[in-house]
Image (cartoon, grey):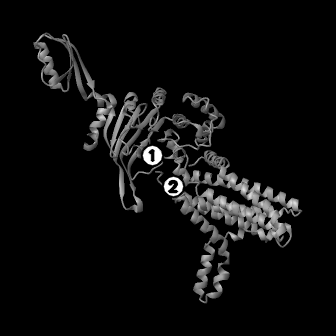
Amino acid sequence: MEEAVRIRDLNKSFRGHLSLSTHHVLRGVSLTVPKGVIYGFLGPNGAGKTTTLKILTGLLFPDGGEITVLGRTGASPKIRRRIGFLPETPYFYDYLTGAELLSFLGRLFGIPKAELADRSEVLLKSVGLENKGSVQLRKYSKGMLQRIGLAQALINDPELVILDEPVSGLDPVGRREMRDLILDLKAKGKTVFFSSHILSDAESICDEVAILMQGQVVKEGPLDKLLGSEIGFWDVTLRVGRGFQIPEGCSVLVQQDTQVLLRVEDEKSLEKVLDAAREAKAGIRAVVPHKSSLEDLFMAQLPGERAQ
Amino acid sequence: MTNPVLMSAQVYAIGKNTFKEAVRSRVFYILLAFAICLLLFSYVLGFLAVGTIRKVVLDVGLSTISYFSAMTAIFVGIGLIYQEIEKKTIYNILSKPLPRSHFLVGRCLGLMSVLLVNLMAMMAVLSAVLVFVGGFTPRIFEAAFFIYLELMILTAVALFFSSITSPVVSALCTIAFYLIGHTSSALPDLLLPNITSDFGKRAILIIYHLLPDLNMLNINNLVAYNIPVAAGFTWRAVLYTGLMVSILLLAAGLAFKRRDLV
């Protein structure tokens, strides 16, 4: 498995005013982002997601630990040539137009002017801003800024795209569009490493996730493995005769004539229900396992007070 | 190893953007308009003051240009880096393959080009007023050249402070530099006659040589009285400016190199 990002034991702390206190933001973060996947970096506000991404892009310097990006150590300008980055709530020079912004940032990669014009046009179109290239950014809506932010992150045709909270603050349509754009990037062979606290969006597009809590990765791996190993409950549909006793350990969701829909919370109770059904010669119509959602998994990682 | 073509493209892009930022801001035009009004007012002053109109217009005109340009350099310069961090626009820039030193040099050159355009506009107005009063002399461009050298130093000073501290502290420090720079040349004449010990005299001279001397770049009076500049003086001034700007940019680069952009 080729790695796009490898982080080992990353630590970062910030000093308070007058250096009287130290706030440890990252406490030994380790994770691996394989190439070609959509990797969700999840966690509550203040968990250290943005700090990690800023270290990867050279905006912050770690106290300790090791980062390897696309096979090279550190976040040197050479590595940043192959990375696209969309910061959280992107701020741009609002006196520039969308096309001027892409042209300006493209020049920082040394892309020739003529090539830049073509790339800008294609990118503006791909993010749905083809008619807004000549409009000053101060006139852009939040969703448009997020889209031009994604366009600027792709101006160098990067191998690795790092997005910090790309769907935050967007309306449902904007979120859907951003999700589609991220899926499109994966289809083009790019690795997408994005942070989010909007779990439903992450669940719908991520191949792998890491959950960060208080500066530490508490869960990491392929999403289907993480969720697949933790079935939350089963819905069992039975066709029963009169006098069928509902076994303990389950609850009745719907009962209509001879059909009954039961919810079973654990595997032992499921076996009990199925044994009882066989004994009573009831028809077992369906047993549907329901995996935990990412939200369930996420909530299970929260420290005591917050989880409640 | 830095690719020189990429480096110059990056520095040029940052400089051009800094230039755009200034010329698309209202403050720039308000300052320029105010300076031009004062230049026109120098013509009126010429009638009221004692002496020839030409000399008054030259004196007031060059001083106005000098002060307004210095104020623009200081007050735009102190926000050059800090505002980028405050407005978070820097995240999009420094996450690109742009070494931080190139960013600083680009911002500095961008402001210097704004100041050059600003200076040229004001010189055009002063020239027009001097032509109108029949006292035009091409030596005002010599004065403008020295004013620009001073502006380059002030830009580098403001940029240095902007890269390490807040705009208020930067403004205070840069203004202090400006005031010290314009008074330091009087230090030996002022203090040496009152000091008897050799050690004290040496200490004063060392301090004098360490302090910035911006007065050496002020030839406004020489131009007003049509006194020629000493031979070799221009080269010394250019060398002094180049050295000051280089040292300040290097210091800014070192201070900014490992700064966390929170």
- Which residue occupies the extreme right position in the image? B134
Residue indicated by mark 2:
B257
Q: Residues within 10 Å of mark 2 (few under 14, many from 20)?
A: few
Quadrant hosting residue A271: top left
Q: Tell me which chain the residue with mark 1 is part of.
A: A
Up the image or down, B102 lies above or below B241; here it is above
Name the one closer to the observer, A139 or B176: A139
Q: What's the CA distance linking mark 1 and mark 2?
A: 15 Å
Q: Residue at x 61, y 66 (%)?
A: B175
Label 2: state its secondary structure.
helix
Q: Nearer the viewer, residue B224 or A161?
A: B224
Q: In the image, are marks 1 and 2 on the same chain?
A: no
Q: Which residue is mark 1?
A: A54
Residue A248: percent from the left, percent from the top? 12, 23
Q: Quadrant of residue A266?
A: top left
Q: Amino acid at mark 1?
A: Lys
Q: Amino acid at mark 2?
A: Lys
Between B193 and A71, the one nearer to me in the picture: B193
Q: Position of residue A197 (x, y in %)?
A: 38, 37
Q: Residue furthest bottom?
A: B196
